[in-house]
Amino acid sequence: MHLVRERCAWSRRITHRDLVPYLIEESAELIEAIETGDAAEMREELGDLLWQVLFHAEIAAGERGEAFDIDDVARGLSEKMIRRHPHVFGDAVATTPEEVLVHWNAAKAAEKSARTSVLDGVSARMPSLALAQKLLGKAASVPGTAAPATAPGAPASEDQLGEALLALVAVARAEGWDAERALRSRLRSLTDDIRAQEGRAGTV
């Protein structure tokens, strides 16, 4: 990667921001390979995603200020995984997935102790459906947050859920509404409600 960055005119001028569209594209292609069960494609797309990691690290290594390289990235990841697996690398005990999650969340909370809101670290740039699922999970941990209730006759499987979501998008299309904008608008309201409830509880 160092040689590519040094000797390739295109790679030399690339910045972190320039790589963002490629990172999104490669992530989407890997997801598709996973969902279709194509092992050959998965192997290739994992390589493309790894290339993104190497590229970003190489760019960072040449920057002024808080520079870091791929060794720093790998070291940080290794240290994090050791902290979050005390039942593997320490004396803690976890015999069920639920117990493992308790250790993981405790370690994560200790790492993020400076955070003052359950929303800290949640990216608004996530796809809207993924963001909705994440925010609903956060809302469940904040008493008083008015999260939407499950509707009667709700889908009983992922297939039925997919049909229901597609049907709602069809309604939006027929009415001339923007389904993406509608959901993001509702999520902003949910975000405001979560922060308001945190403020009332004195958690921020």
Image (tube, rainbow, N blue to C red):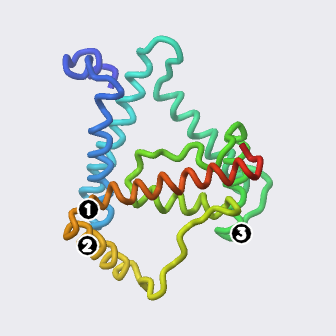
- What residue is at 30 percent from the left and 73 percent from the top? 168
Residue hosting label 3: 95
**51 lies above or below 91:** above
Q: Amino acid at mark 3?
A: Thr
Counting residues from the start of the chain, the first of labels 2 and 1 encountered is 2
Q: Quadrant of residue 164 in the image? A: bottom left
Query: Disc 2 versus disc 1: distance between alpha carbons?
Result: 8 Å
**Direction from residue 152 to residue 98 in the image, left or right:** right
Residue hosting label 1: 177
SS class, disc 2: helix
SS class, disc 3: loop
Give percent across and percent down for residue 176.
21, 63
- In this view, the residue in front, 3 or 188, is 188
Q: Quadrant of residue 56 in the image? A: top left
Give percent across and percent down for residue 30.
31, 54
Disc 2 and disc 1 in contact, CB within 8 angstroms? yes
Q: Amino acid at mark 1?
A: Trp
Counting residues from the start of the chain, the first of labels 1 and 3 encountered is 3
Mark 1 neighbour class, 10 Å CA radius: few under 14, some 14 to 19, many 20 or more: few
**144 lies above or below 106:** below
Q: Residue furthest top?
A: 64
Give percent across and percent down for residue 69.
47, 24
Mark 3 neighbour class, 10 Å CA radius: few under 14, some 14 to 19, many 20 or more: few
Find residue 171 and name its label.
Answer: 2
- What residue is at 26 percent from the left and 46 percent from the top? 25
Query: Disc 3 versus disc 2: distance between alpha carbons?
Result: 47 Å
Disc 3 and disc 2 in contact, CB within 8 angstroms? no
Find residue 110 and name its label.
Answer: none
